[in-house]
Image: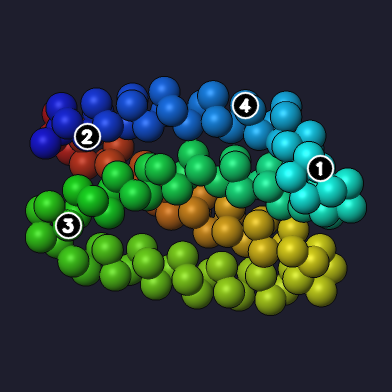
Amino acid sequence: LQINVMRTIKFIFMLLTPAILLIFFLGDMILSLGFGEEYSENGFKLLWILALSGIPLAFNTVYITVKRVQKELKPVIYVYAFIALSTIGVSYALMSKEGLVGLGIAWLLSHGVVTLFIGLATIRRWAQSL
């Protein structure tokens, strides 16, 4: 399982890195070609944030998949509940000030916090096994 997880992470980042770079450098142009200049001006920041959130989202998805394979459902429920509640809460706080960008920020922060906790727990488990 550990070998497959590492392969999966490498493969995800081989696909994710060029996609994120494409969005960072050409996303504005792609949005304006497809939807017009006004849409591009209003949506590019959100697109940029959501593209960046692909990194913690990838880690969280791999973690959830591993927990499902191991038939440990409590961590899956906790992760999804935290992401849902924190995204809603932070979105509510930021939407009045930032608009839709606040929703993107909440999404990125929620997934980032989960990734941080998963990473710390994984490092602690590896350190204890040594």
Distance CA(mark 3)–CA(mark 4): 31 Å
As displayed, is residue 122 above or below residue 99?
Answer: above
- Please tell me whether mark 2 sits on a helix, a strand or a loop: helix
Q: Tell me the CA gap for discs 3 and 1.
A: 41 Å
Please tell me whether mark 1 or mark 4 is closer to you in this view: 1
Task: Please tell me whether mark 4 sits on a helix, a strand or a loop.
Answer: helix
Query: Which of the two discs, 1 and 2, labels the residue nearer the N terminus?
Result: 2
Mark 3 touches mark 1? (CB < 8 Å): no
Q: Is residue 31 above or below residue 12?
A: below
The residue located at (66%, 34%) in the rendering is 23
Q: Mark 4 = which residue?
A: 21
For image coordinates 81% across by 42% down, the residue present is 32
In the image, what residue type sits under mark 2?
Val
Give the residue at mark 2: 5
How far apart are the two marked residues, 2 and 4, measured between alpha carbons?
Answer: 24 Å
Say left or right for 106 vs 9.
right
Please name the amino acid that badge 1 sits on: Ser
Kind of residue sitting beneath label 4: Leu
Crowd band around label 4 with a 10 angstrom C-alpha radius: few (<14), some (14–19), many (20+): some
> In terms of depth relative to the viewer, which is nearer, 47 or 88?
47
Kindly identify which residue carries mark 3: 68
Q: Label 1 belongs to which residue?
A: 32
**Cα distance, mark 2 to mark 3?**
13 Å
* Residue 39 in the image: above or below residue 6: below
Q: Earlier in the sequence, mark 2 or mark 4?
A: 2
